[in-house]
Amino acid sequence: MGAGASELAGTGEAAASGSGLGEMPELCAAEVLLRLGATDICRLARLNRAFRGAAAADFVWEAKLPENYGYLMGFVHGGKEEQDEQESRGMKGRGRVPMGKKEVYARLAKAVPFDDGKREFWLDKSNGMVCMALSSKALVITGIDDRRYWVHMPTTESRFRSVAYLQQIWWLEVVGEIDFVFPAGTYSLYFRLHLGKPSSSSNRRDHHRKCSESKNSTAIHGWDRKPVRFQLSTSSSAVSQQSQCYLLDQPGSWVLYHAGDFVSPEQGHGQEQKPMKLKFSMAQIDCTHTKGGLCVDSVVVYPKGLFQPERVVRADQKRFVH
């Protein structure tokens, strides 16, 4: 993500004038760029002067930004990251320097933390839609303050550098809420889970895996007895979604468990888009047996259909009117 954002923020150098393209009017080049994604725009900016000039035009990048980019930038302006940057440049108290639309896109393509760093969002560079992640510390987890049941473990396997690890419990319940203005579109919400303890280092060699397998195998228990139930409801719909599945995946693999989809509707011309409230949960509250050996990393929201490198589990869903 960081490399792509740096490419967006850079000016780019022309690699060659290109036969027949060197004399292309800049407006014609801009018409081409309007039909491309952000990454391809940056690549073409290296082709010649016309594309380089067009790739810096505000109207090209404004067309790639979500309609509520002003709302999104509100999380950047005045945030701790911007304050630290202003202090490092000796600009504190001098006001904000206006940003071009390309700079706005580049900033939003990097993670924007909020809620004291427990949540963050970013733009997917392929389509300019919003993605979001909530750390385990942004969720309400039953028994989280009792170290007999849960512990927070540091790990490089999480974007938040920490996960909640379940040692053993009778009543599993993890609940969360999102109150946010999502750009119009369809989104999917997932729980990112992992059976077994995570690695504390990014160096996950086979011998390290084998050494921890025996410990993990005894700690992981109870997930084959009853399925885990996932629920999702939104303030814009009277229908809630519910699905369930057994957590029987290979220990040591991060898996995205699909809780449901939601639609952020289009607004009429001139209408202000209102925040949408999402409520979601995962639970296994059959108290006839204990369960343990589970990592809860985060809840993530992606544009529906966006390819993810991790395995996705989609259980059969039911819908209920509430």
Image: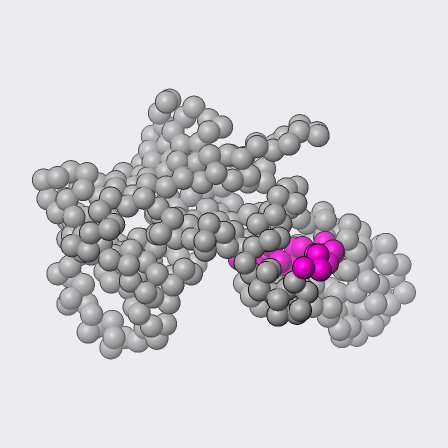
Residue 37 against residue 142 in the figure, above or below: below
Q: Quadrant of residue 33?
A: bottom right
Residue extending farthest left: 288
Query: Is 45 positioned to the left or the right of 310 in the image?
Result: right
Residue 192 rendering spot, x and y as whole percentages:
35, 52
Instruction: State the image coordinates of residue 1 (x, y, percent, origin top left).
Output: 54, 63
233 is higher (above) or lower (below) than 106: above
Q: Is residue 93 visible?
A: yes
Q: Residue at x 62, y 43 (%)?
A: 71
Is residue 92 rendered to the left or right of residue 11? left
The way the protein has been coloured in the rendering is one colour
Q: Position of residue 232 (x, y in %)?
A: 38, 35
For image coordinates 25% across by 75% down, the residue present is: 208
Residue at horizontal 12%, vertical 39%? Answer: 287
| Image coordinates for residue 260, horizontal then vertical, percent | 40, 38
Q: Residue 194: in sight, yes or no?
A: no
Magenta stretch contains residue 102:
yes
Name which residue lies at 75% across and 65% down.
45
Q: Nearer the viewer, residue 70 or 96?
A: 96
Q: Nearer the viewer, residue 55 or 86?
A: 86
293 in magenta? no
The residue most toward the front is 93
Q: Which residues are magenta?
A: 93-111
